[in-house]
Each structure stands twice: as structure tokens, then as C-alpha cells.
């Protein structure tokens, strides 16, 4: 995936949370952001960035992850709409995605999409 300056900084903890099932952190983050943005308007608890959440500690190290420019633009627009930095919303999207995987809702959506 090319990065043309459309990058976000995530902690290694956040990347571990979304599983790193692939060797490419950009692919993992792209999947998480796509899933997160697809839930816009679904009124799921925890979807909007929680205003009380402080920026995460960066003590464990960080990784700069490039996103497809179109996906980055969508994330940036949503971050602006919610009034938060793109990196923070990317982190939130990754954690949201990890929670959805934990709850089994990702599997439910895959099966529902397959059946329709």
C-alpha cells in the first residue's frame, strides 16, 4: 500500500489489540477503519470518540502506518466532524474493531452478508 503522506501514528499496543493477523500493519488498520466508518449511523454504544478519553500513552513505542489516501480522507473527515485528531480517531477505530471482534459481531456481520 502506498503512503503519499496519509499516515497515522499508533502505539504497538493498539496494533496488537487488532491482532496483526497480517504482516502489514496498514492492512490491519485499513480493515479496522473501514469497519468503524461502516458503523457510522448504526447508533452503537462506543462508536463516537469518547470525549473523556485522554490520548494514549506512547511509552510502548509507536508505529507510523500509511493508509490508502481515500480511506485516510474519510477518516480525516470523520475526525474533523467529531472534533478529534486523526491519530486519536484511528486509535479509537482500532480499539472499536478489536472490541467488535471480541464480542463476535464481526463474525455475525460476515455471516449475514454472506446469506444476503
Image (cartoon, rainbow, N blue to C red):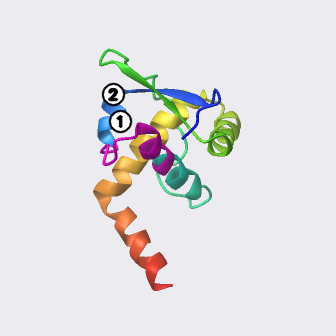
Segment tinted magenta in the rendering: 18-31
Q: Which residue is located at x 51 percent, y 36 percent?
A: 90
* Disc 1: CA contacts within 10 A as few (<14), some (14-19) or many (>=20): many
In the image shown, does 31 or 83 lie closer to the viewer? 31
- Counting from the top left corner in percent of width and height, residue 95 is at 39, 41
- Image quadrant where residue 11 sits: top left
Residue beneath disc 1: 15
Task: Please identify the quarter of the rendering in which residue 7 is found.
Answer: top right
Magenta region includes residue 15? no
State the SS at label 1: helix
Q: Is residue 54 visible in this depiction of the protein?
A: yes
Residue nearest the observer in this picture, 5 or 41: 5
Label pair 1/2, CB-CB below 8 angstroms? yes
In the image: residue 97, left or right of residue 38: left
Q: Secondary structure at mark 2?
A: helix
Query: Which disc number belongs to residue 107?
Result: none
Residue 12 circle label: 2
Few, some or many C-alpha atoms within 10 Å of disc 2 (few <14, some 14-19, many ≥20)? some
Amino acid at each position: 500500500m502506498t503512503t503519499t503522506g496519509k499516515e497515522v501514528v499508533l502505539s504497538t499496543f493498539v496494533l496488537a489489540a487488532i491482532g496483526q493477523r497480517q504482516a502489514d500493519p496498514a492492512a490491519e488498520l485499513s480493515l479496522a477503519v473501514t469497519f468503524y466508518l461502516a458503523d457510522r449511523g448504526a447508533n452503537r454504544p462506543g462508536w463516537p470518540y469518547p470525549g473523556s478519553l485522554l490520548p494514549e500513552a506512547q511509552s510502548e513505542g509507536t508505529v507510523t502506518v500509511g493508509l490508502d489516501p481515500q480511506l485516510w480522507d474519510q477518516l480525516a473527515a470523520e475526525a474533523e466532524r467529531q472534533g478529534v485528531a486523526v491519530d486519536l480517531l484511528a486509535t479509537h477505530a482500532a480499539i472499536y474493531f478489536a472490541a467488535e471482534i471480541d464480542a463476535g459481531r464481526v463474525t455475525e456481520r460476515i455471516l449475514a452478508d454472506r446469506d444476503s
